[in-house]
Each structure stands twice: as C-alpha cells, then as structure tokens.
C-alpha cells in the first residue's frame, strides 16, 4: 500500500488572518480611535507606518504591501483619494453600450470590495450610477460599507436607483448647492450633499469643492470607483493621490474610454508616475503613486 500524503498544516498566517486586521484599522480610523493601537501581528512606527510582524504566507505579504498606503492613512488631516479603473488592453472600461460586467476577473472584483471596506466613502460618476445601478457595498468581503456618493451635479439621476433606495448603507447624492433644495424634495435632505460651487460659471466640475464638502462630514479617505470620465477629471484637477489600474487580457474594440487626460506634444513631457505591479489572477494591477512627482497637470487645475 502506498503511503498517504498528509499536507503539513501551516501555522503561518495568511490572507484570512490579515484581512480582519485591515478592517479593524479602517474601523478605528472612522471612529477616530488610534489605528496604530491595532494588534500584535502588525507593528506600527511613526515614520514607516504599519509593517507585518513575524512570518506570513506570500499572498498575505503581497496583499499587505498593496494595501499599506491606505492602512497608513492618518485619522485626521487632508483628504486622500484613491481611484480605480479596470480596463482592457486597448484602454476601455466598458463596451460602447456601457457593459462593463467582467472586464476584469474575480480577483479584481474582490479587491474593489476591499477598497470600499477600507475607505470612508466610495464615489461614482453619474454615468456609472445610471448605467450600472451599482450597490457599492462590501458584500464580497467582511467589512463595513462605506458611505456611497453619487456625483450628480445637475440632478440627472433617477431617485429609484438602488443606492438611493435599498437602505444598505448611507448614500449621498452630491449636487451643486443651487440644486440642493430640489434634490432634497426628491430624496430627503439626509441623502443630499449640496456642494457650494461644485459647478463653476462655465459649468465645469470643481472637485476640490466636493472634497472639502465631504471632509466637513468627516469623509476623508475616499475611493473613486469610476467611470473613466470621473477618474480622469480627478487626476486632471490634481485631486487623486493613487490609482489602481487593472489591465485585463481582453480587447473591447471601441468602447467607453478609461483615462482621457490633457495632451502633451512631446514624450518627455508625458507624466510617468511611479508604479508597482501586482498580479490579480489573469489581470495585472498597476498601483500608481500620482503624487510622487508633484502635480501631473498643474496648468489644468
Ligand atoms: N471597468 C471599470 O472599472 C468601470 C468602473 C466604473 C464604471 N465603468 C463603466 O463606465 C461607464 C460609465 O463611465 P463614464 O466615464 O461614461 O461616466 P462616469 O465617469 O461614471 O460619469 C461621468 C459623466 O456621467 C455623464 N453621464 C453619462 N450618462 C449619464 C446619465 N445617463 N445620467 C446622468 N449623467 C450621465 C455626465 O455627463 P456629461 O456627459 O454631460 O459630461 C458626467 O459628466 C459605464 O459603462 C460603466 O459600466 C467601468
């Protein structure tokens, strides 16, 4: 009889042990208690932020490295914004009629839910809200739902959208303050964030005004989940600190574009933000630090 091979049980902790610690850090930041008091398996140091203590499985080490910039956010201070886009090899985030279901694989989807769980609020543009009717919850992972923010300056969205009616988590429809009374009539005042001068005289969106209004509500660690127009506007206005760009091995052809940013005439002027690469199943996630080289588009702010 051939010997039975019994796998050696691993006592080295993995992602299942790490994730609850990440959730705990986010919960402490939200409740303004010290995130750095968290727990023994993580160490904290004022200059280097969090680090892992002892032995961890490789996938836990990689997840920790990916999430560390968010985990290290202080509980007070300036707003900090992370964006994401899942795109095809040819740079689109959805087909031409708006279908973005499964651009990326399941690993990226889980990652989006993790980002939601670690941030105070998740923001989507009106196009995404109208086409996807998303729930914007953390249902694929353990962790608190963020406040859901639908960016709809001129009140084009239907009040019957899921995020506005399902009661799963607080939702704010962010509109220009001049439309706030009308929005409150439709949705109830508690679901409306009227932002002073969200639209300037020419009708252009002022995202700094949105960040200030969210900060007044204690929402400072922010996740912009899409779509391409909205993420591009945050970057062009210098309102995004980091971007998770997940590239899937698929060709969409002609679809809804991902990043569309101000042009540069010569290559040497094109910004090259430093990035790290993470494998996510079949997809490749670029973690881009948009602040490392200063303002990417100073003249467009
Ligand atoms: N793969 C991904 O990671 C990902 C993530 C999120 C969303 N998506 C996909 O991206 C697409 C949407 O992205 P996007 O860049 O077009 O828009 P977006 O960034 O979500 O929203 C920006 C724009 O929405 C416009 N808008 C378009 N249709 C609208 C409508 N029916 N009602 C109200 N406002 C509307 C607005 O107006 P103007 O046109 O007047 O400027 C606005 O400026 C969807 O197909 C969604 O499925 C993909």
Image (cartoon, helix red, strand yellow):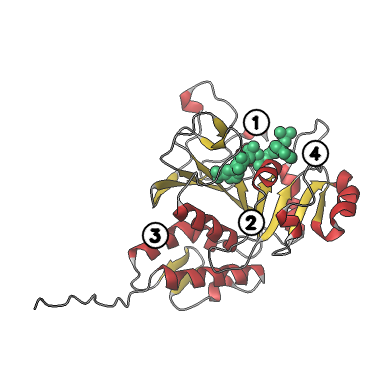
The residue singled out by tag 1 in the image is 299
Image quadrant for the N terminus?
bottom left
The residue singled out by tag 3 in the image is 62
Quadrant of the rendered structure where residue 125 is? top right
- Residue 37 in the image: state x and y as whole percent: 54, 76
- Of the pair 60 and 206, the residue shown nearer to us: 60
* Tag 4 near tag 1, CB within 8 Å: no
Helix, strand or loop for disc 4: loop
- Asked whether mark 4 and ligand 1 are closer than 8 Å, the reply comes as no
User: Residue 199 has which mark?
Assistant: 4
Work out how far the residue at label 4 is from the one at label 2, CA to CA, in angstroms.
Answer: 25 Å
4 or 3: tag closer to the N-terminus: 3
Could you tell me which residue is drawn at 80 percent across and 33 percent down?
203
2 or 3: tag closer to the N-terminus: 3
Could you tell me which residue is drawn at 91 percent across and 50 percent down?
181
Could you tell me which residue is drawn at 44 percent across and 62 percent down?
64
- Asked whether mark 3 and ligand 1 are closer than 8 Å, the reply comes as no
Q: Quadrant of ligand 1?
A: top right
The residue singled out by tag 2 in the image is 136
1 or 2: tag closer to the N-terminus: 2
Work out how far the residue at label 1 is from the one at label 2, CA to CA, in angstroms.
Answer: 33 Å
């Amino acid at each position: 009889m051939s010997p039975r091979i019994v796998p050696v049980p691993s006592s080295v902790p993995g992602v299942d042990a790490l994730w609850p610690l990440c959730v705990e850090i986010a919960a402490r930041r939200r409740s303004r208690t010290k995130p750095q008091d968290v727990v023994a398996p993580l160490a904290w140091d004022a200059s280097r932020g969090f680090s892992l203590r002892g032995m961890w499985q490789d996938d836990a080490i990689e997840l920790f490295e990916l999430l560390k910039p968010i985990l290290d956010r202080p509980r007070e201070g300036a707003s900090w914004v992370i964006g994401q886009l899942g795109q095809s090899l040819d740079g689109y985030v959805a087909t031409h009629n708006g279908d973005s279901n499964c651009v990326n694989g399941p690993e990226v989807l889980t990652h989006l839910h993790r980002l939601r769980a670690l941030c105070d609020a998740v923001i989507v543009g009106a196009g995404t809200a109208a086409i996807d009717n998303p729930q914007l919850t953390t249902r694929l992972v353990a962790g608190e739902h963020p406040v859901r923010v639908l960016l709809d300056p001129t009140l084009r969205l239907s009040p019957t959208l899921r995020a506005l009616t399902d009661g799963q988590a607080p939702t704010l429809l962010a509109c220009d303050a001049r439309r706030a009374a009308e929005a409150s009539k439709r949705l109830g005042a508690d679901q409306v964030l009227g932002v002073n001068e969200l639209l300037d005289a020419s009708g252009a969106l002022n995202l700094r005004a949105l960040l200030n209004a969210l900060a007044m509500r204690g929402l400072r660690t922010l996740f912009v989940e899409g779509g391409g127009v909205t993420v591009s506007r945050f970057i062009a206005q210098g309102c995004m600190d980091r971007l998770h760009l997940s590239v899937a091995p698929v060709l969409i052809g002609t679809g809804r574009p991902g990043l569309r940013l101000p042009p540069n005439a010569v290559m040497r002027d094109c910004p090259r933000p430093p990035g790290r690469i993470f494998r996510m199943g079949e997809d490749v996630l670029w973690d881009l630090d948009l602040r490392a080289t200063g303002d990417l588009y100073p003249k467009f702010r």
